[in-house]
Amino acid sequence: MPVPTTPEVLHAWNALWDAKSPFYLPNTLQKKTRVGFSWFRPLTVNVPNTGQIVVLNSTAFGIVTVELQNAVVSDMWKVKGGTLSFDPASGKLSVELIFTALKFAGDYEVRRGRATGDALKMATRTFRGHPLFQSSAMDADPDLALARTYQPRLSQTANGQQMLNTYYTHNEAFSTAFQNQSFGYHWANDDMYGDTTKGFADLTATAAQPGNTSTVIVNSTDGKTYNDNYRQHSYHMQNLLVVACNVQKNNDAATAASNFKIATVDHSGTAQTVDTVFNIVSTGTPPSASAIAKFVEPDWLAAINERNKPIHEAIEREEEAVRRGVIIREETTRPIQSGFVSYVPAPSLKLTGTVTQLEDGTPAVHFDAVDGIVQNVDLALGVFPGKLHPELSAAVAKANFLKSVLSRQITNSLTASSLLPHVGRLLSLALMEGTPPIR
């Protein structure tokens, strides 16, 4: 087949807009369609999550962020053809797609009062009181930075690897536990064992400093002598974490937290330095199913569990109140989820590419670029209980930065999607067919 002429390319392009033609583009974009021996599938375009973007800072609600998730661009079948330009000498081709509107829809998540992060950050923030959403401050926390320097050393043994893997596998669940205010309060404030979590964490940080790892006692009040308060407090908090994970339906995380004591309880009643702890980890083995099944809580640990029952009840009641809507989510640090939709006034998009010949002489159209950007992305946010929604909607309507992010994301997603190859394949088939002019 010779190189297509401009009239032939134009005739093929026109065929994509003839409702009676097998090459009618809106059909192939809307439903699964067979054209000759080729199948075309309906086209939707996934748009990446935005990440948490600050949209509101008020006295009533503090700093509020919104993240758009699971977003999809659809309704691309509501399109008509525009102009075409083709240079037979170079094979360069450009065509215009004119969309009526693009449907942009998905989920959104609102957070206020506390940034998300890993469980270490959440635990640290609970008693350190970092300013809201200053993630850089959390990342710069010297105790967390020190803890992370020990991760490579942990990963050198099977037991250490399992500890790290368990933590990261259930990190989200452990972080979610801090959304329960009863749990978070006790984590930060309980000092029935001589100190609070912050105090015991400071002891650990001191013992972990370079030069102290073989001389300073971790489970101590002065770094020199063993003190059982450290052990009592740690198992007290572990017990509450297990309960919080269970009532939030993160049962695997609860099991993992509970099983941790199987590997540690036998060693927790003796004085230990950081180096001693690493030696225990390196020489130990991950707890087996049989060891877990045979484990019997010592009396002192059973006493902690019994003493914690009123706190368990408070944690459970709070979760039930949130589930029943007695406590609405905007009154907590919990994320709020709902849906959004936007019908985006779409500009005409100019697709540019080339028409070439394959080895067998058949024409092949390849589009590789899009000119034009989606703009004016106005979001309609699904309603949720409370007083925040109206303020959030008003703030989002004025959030030009968010709209700018969405404009770029939607345009980039369209460019990276199968839209270009979809149109190119269909136009190639129309050219091969030698479509006559449409009258």
Image (cartoon, rainbow, N blue to C red):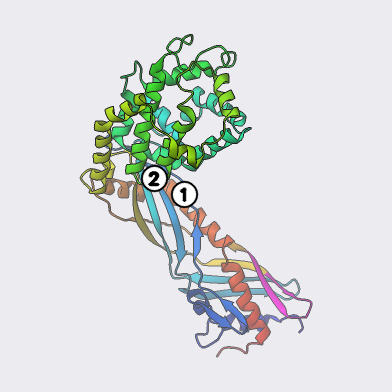
> Badge 1 local density, few (<14 within 10 Å), some, or many (20+)?
some
| Span shown in magenta | 354-368
Q: Quadrant of residue 89?
A: bottom right
Determine which residue is flagged by label 1.
50
**Is residue 364 visible in this depiction of the protein?**
yes
Tag 2: amino acid: Asn
Residue 230 within the magenta-colored segment of the rendering:
no
In three-dimensional space, the C-alpha distance between marks 1 and 2, rounded to whole angstroms, equals 29 Å
Provide residue 114's location: percent of width, then percent of height: 37, 35
Q: Residue at x 54, y 39 (%)?
A: 165
User: Mark 2 and mark 1 in contact (Cβ < 8 Å)?
Assistant: no
Provide residue 79's location: percent of width, then percent of height: 48, 73
Q: Which mark is residue 14?
A: none
Q: Main secondary structure of the magenta part?
A: strand
Q: Looking at this view, name the residue that lies furthest to the left.
A: 326
Which of the two residues, 397 or 360, is positioned nearer the viewer here?
360
Q: Residue at x 28, y 54 (%)?
A: 383
Q: Is residue 50 above or below residue 285?
A: below
N-term mark: 1 or 2: 1
